[in-house]
Amino acid sequence: MIRILFVCHGNICRSPMAEYVMKDMVHKRGIEGRFEIASAATSREETGNPVYPPARRMLSKHGIDCCGHHARQMTRGDYDRYDYIIGMDRENLRNICRIAGSDPMGKVSLLLDHTARSGQEVADPWYTGNFEETWQDVWDGCTGLLAEMEG
């Protein structure tokens, strides 16, 4: 089983978008049984909250349901549990490593590191309001990550 954890600051926009996009991709390929996919936050600010309404609408626009999601903070134990820990921006990477203690197994990467845009960050719609741009970043990143895993 391949275990993937997507991480952003609050776990209400970018990381749940990535979680549900990746779940949709593996479901459509009929390989969902090979994966465990989840998301988490580096902060406690949004703990328990659902996906932010504009992010939920963007997923719904693409036929993806995210009902039942509740934000949670990443824990140190998540580092041991997941094979891939995918941050949306560099601040997320720093906070992931702070929570985990470090990254001795090289599990932590940026989502867009799995694309031709390696090193770039997923646009944060909380600040930009541009959920379409974030959707495209998440789609590209998940497509690249899945291609790596299938290759």
Image: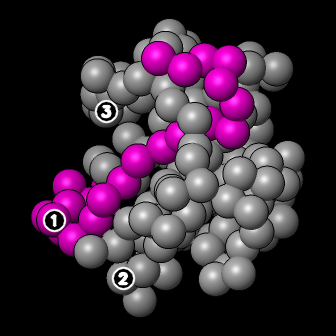
Three-letter amino acid code at disc 2? Answer: Glu
Q: Residues within 10 Å of mark 3 (few under 14, many from 20)?
A: some
- Would residue 41 be found to the left or right of residue 80 on screen? right
Three-letter amino acid code at disc 3? Answer: Ile
- Give the magenta-colored segment's residue range: 25-48
Query: From the viewer's perspective, is residue 144 above or below residue 93?
Result: below
**Residue 41 belongs to the span the image colors magenta:** yes
Q: Give the residue drawn at x 37%, y 32%.
A: 62
Q: Give the residue drawn at x 34%, y 73%.
A: 2
Q: Position of residue 103 (x, y in %)?
A: 72, 73
Gap between marks 1 and 3, in whole Å?
18 Å
Place residue 73 in its image quadrant.
top right
Is the C terminus in the top left, top right, bottom left or bottom right quadrant?
Answer: bottom left
Q: Position of residue 70 (x, y in %)?
A: 41, 23
Q: Nearer the viewer, residue 108 or 99?
A: 99
Gap between marks 2 and 3, in whole Å?
22 Å
Q: Give the residue drawn at x 36%, y 82%.
A: 150
Q: Position of residue 78 (x, y in %)?
A: 51, 56
Q: Nearer the viewer, residue 68 or 78?
A: 78
Place residue 86 in its image quadrant.
bottom right
- Would residue 146 be found to the left or right of residue 23 on screen? right
User: Which SS class for mark 2?
Assistant: helix
Which is closer to the viewer, label 1 or label 3?
1
Q: Which mark is residue 150?
A: 2
Visible residue check, residue 15 = no
Task: Give the residue at mark 1.
Answer: 33
Q: Position of residue 115 (x, y in %)?
A: 66, 69
* Of pointers 1 and 3, the one earlier in the residue sequence: 1
